[in-house]
């Protein structure tokens, strides 16, 4: 199942440097940094990333890595976003209506 595969991959590589995250989303590292800077307000230091020595040197958490699914436009990002939307919708529906749908 795609969601299991994505979770296994991300949990095994996170926290990860920008280069590994870029490989996962099939973009260049500079694209990760550009999107991060364009959407910095969506990322919380300590929750989504940690700054290492250097201006553009980050370690990304699993939650931070998943945030990029919303701001990148690769096929992989879209697959991750669809999985997140499905899992999220299923959980919200279950919370609102219970496991039996009532």
Image (tube, rainbow, N blue to C red):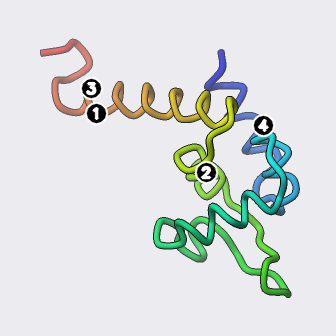
Label 3 vs label 2: CA separation? Answer: 26 Å
- Percent across and percent down for residue 40 are 54, 72
- Return the disc, 2 or 4, that comes first in the chain's sequence: 4
Name the residue carrying label 2: 68
**Residue on which disc 1 sits:** 92
Of the residues under marks 3 and 2, which one precedes in the sequence?
A: 2
Kindly report the distance in space between the C-alpha atoms of the residues bearing marks 2 and 4. 15 Å
Could you say which is closer to the camera, residue 71 or residue 45?
71
- Crowding around mark 1 (Cα neighbors within 10 Å: few <14, some 14 to 19, many 20+) is few
Front-most of residues 64 and 19: 19
Above or below, 23 against 75 in this view is below
Residue 46, horizontal then vertical, whole percent? 60, 75
Q: Residue at x 70, y 75 (%)?
A: 50
The answer to which image quadrant residue 17 occupies is: bottom right
Q: CA distance from mark 3 to mark 1?
A: 5 Å
Q: Are marks 3 and 1 in contact (CB under 8 Å)?
A: yes
**In the displayed structure, does residue 28 sit left or right of residue 67?**
right
**Labels 2 and 1: the sequence-earlier one:** 2
For marks 3 and 4, the one nearer the N-term is: 4
Which corner quadrant holds the N terminus? top right
- Regarding mark 3 in the picture, which secondary structure is present there? helix
| Count of numbered labels shown in the rendering | 4
At x 87%, y 57%, the residue is 19
Q: Residue at x 73, y 80 (%)?
A: 51
Residue under circle 3? 94
Q: Quadrant of residue 14?
A: bottom right
């Amino acid at each position: 199942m795609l969601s299991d595969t994505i979770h296994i991959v991300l949990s095994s590589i996170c926290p990860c440097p920008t280069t590994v995250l870029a490989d996962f989303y099939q973009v260049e590292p500079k694209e990760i940094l550009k999107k991060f800077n364009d959407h910095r307000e969506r990322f919380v230091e300590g929750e989504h990333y940690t700054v290492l020595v250097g201006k553009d040197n980050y370690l990304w958490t699993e939650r931070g890595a998943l945030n990029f699914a919303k701001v990148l436009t690769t096929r992989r990002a879209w697959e991750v976003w669809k999985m997140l939307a499905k899992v999220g919708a299923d959980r919200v529906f279950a919370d609102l209506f219970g496991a039996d749908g009532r």
